Image (cartoon, rainbow, N blue to C red):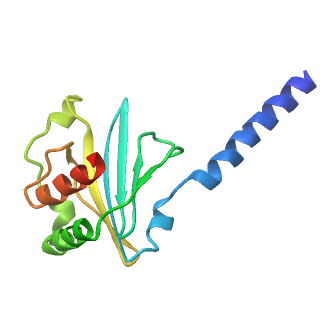
Amino acid sequence: MKLLITCLTLIVLACNSAKAPNDNSLKELGQHELTVIYQAHTRGFFEEISITEKSVILFKDYEKLKPITGTISAKEWKICIDLVEAIDLKSISQLTAPSNLRQSDRVPFAHVSIIKKGDTIKSSDFDHKNPPKELKELVELIISIKEN
């Protein structure tokens, strides 16, 4: 019995220590001047796209253990900056979604987070791929960058 408890304890400790270095938290991403994060999720689906000046990181699991990394072109980054600057960041959390299909599990919940100089600004929730009109161009750009 003691052997079984010891083995289970070691397994739990090994799993926890394996997770820690791979967890890319928002704090790490917040060290850059600007980070744009698009997250969509429901019970059986998770997707997070983090875009910085030099990289695109895609997570497809809640634990964020297996990041898929890519690069972003200077042109795409410039467009992203222009779109973020065109948004009124103070009112982003009060934007109204054009539809509410997410409330009946037809589509995933989604939101955009903008980390600018260490401050995190999160939008209101909306249907995946159907954001408020103020965020539409930015969300379409983020999804197109992910698909390329």
Percent position of residue 39, x then y: 32, 49
Q: In which quarter of the view is residue 42 placed? A: top left
Q: In which quarter of the view is residue 94 placed? A: bottom left
Q: Is residue 4 left or right of residue 86?
A: right
Residue closest to the eye, 43 or 63: 63
Would you place residue 53 above or below residue 57 in this image? below
**Residue 95 visible in the snapshot:** no
Q: Is residue 133 left or right of residue 90?
A: left
Percent position of residue 95, x then y: 13, 58
Percent position of residue 54, x then y: 39, 68
Would you place residue 137 above or below residue 106 in this image? below
Residue closest to the eye, 82 or 13: 82
**Residue 86 visible in the snapshot:** yes
Q: Residue at x 26, y 54 (%)?
A: 145
Q: How many marks?
A: 0
Q: Residue at x 26, y 69 (%)?
A: 77
Percent position of residue 46, x then y: 37, 39
Would you place residue 77 above or below residue 138 in this image? below
Would you place residue 44 above or below residue 38 in this image? above
Q: Residue at x 35, y 33 (%)?
A: 45
Q: Is residue 136 left or right of residue 35?
A: left
Q: Residue at x 80, y 35 (%)?
A: 9
Considering every residue shown, the one lying at the far top of the view is: 1
Specify the quadrant that holds the N terminus. top right
Residue closest to the eye, 102 or 136: 136
Residue closest to the eye, 110 or 75: 75
